[in-house]
Image (cartoon, rainbow, N blue to C red):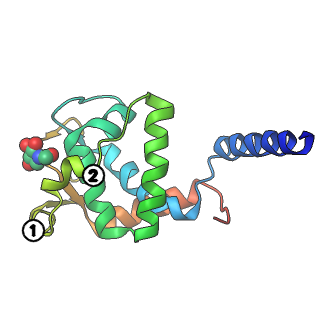
Amino acid sequence: MYSLWYLVAVVALLARTLDAANIIPISERCVTAVYTALNYISFVGEPTAGLWQTTCQNRLKVTSIYAASEVYCREDEILAGFTRLNNLCCDTANIELLSKHSVADNLTDERLRQMKIVDFQEVLRGELLDFPVLLSPTYYDRTFRTVVSTTQTSAS
Ligand SMILES: *[C@@H]1O[C@H](CO)[C@@H](O)[C@H](O)[C@H]1NC(C)=O
């Protein structure tokens, strides 16, 4: 019993330490890069402000997050990344991430093909978009490299 609780405590402590060090496991970096990149773009709809509020609940932003993840992330990265994002929404903002299912109408292959592709700094600061967008490959790559370089490497 003692050893079990000891293990639980160590794991909990470790998890918090990893969080504090801002270590993002490799499998979670793709989706993290996607929603980080989309933090530079504002969308109409509720809510319009608040980093986590919009990331988790703004329909157009969430649709854009799912869209770029479909295009740039592998299946396992999508699973790991959205598990992380959902946990962040719950833990940080006490809200749930809009489900993929709830925005599925705008994520069909055809809709993805028709989505406006945006480059880094193409959308002006303060401009509010009233449609979901797809990150350009260079915008995604650029943010991915930033996410990797500002975090440390971990094995998972
Ligand atoms: C799909 O996108 C349009 C805007 O382009 C939006 O008005 C509509 O609510 C979205 N539908 C869903 C199910 O999110």
- In the rendering, which numbered label is found on residue 102? none
Q: Who's the residue at 24% across and 39% down the image?
A: 125
Q: Which residue is mark 1?
A: 110
Give x and y (percent) for residue 62. Answer: 27, 46
Give x and y (percent) for residue 82. Answer: 42, 53
Q: Is residue 33 left or right of residue 99?
A: right
In the depicted view, which residue is nearer to us: 52 or 125?
Answer: 52
Q: Secondary structure at mark 1?
A: helix
Q: Secondary structure at mark 2?
A: loop
Quarter of the image with the C terminus is: bottom right
Task: Give me the C-alpha separation between circle 2 and circle 1.
Answer: 16 Å
Give x and y (percent) for residue 1. Answer: 89, 41
Of the numbered discs 2 and 1, the one sitting upstream in the chain is: 2
Q: Which residue is mark 2?
A: 100
Which of the 4 quarters of the picture holds residue 46?
top left
**Amino acid at circle 2:** Lys
Crowd tier of the residue under label 2, counting other residues whose Cα lies within 10 Å: few below 14, some 14–19, many 20 or above:
some
Crowd tier of the residue under label 1, counting other residues whose Cα lies within 10 Å: few below 14, some 14–19, many 20 or above:
few
In the depicted view, which residue is nearer to us: 110 or 2?
Answer: 2
Q: Is residue 64 left or right of residue 5?
A: left
Q: Is residue 120 left or right of residue 83?
A: left
Residue 140 visible in rendering: yes
Q: Who's the residue at 68% across and 45% down the image?
A: 21
Q: Who's the residue at 11% across and 62% down the image?
A: 111
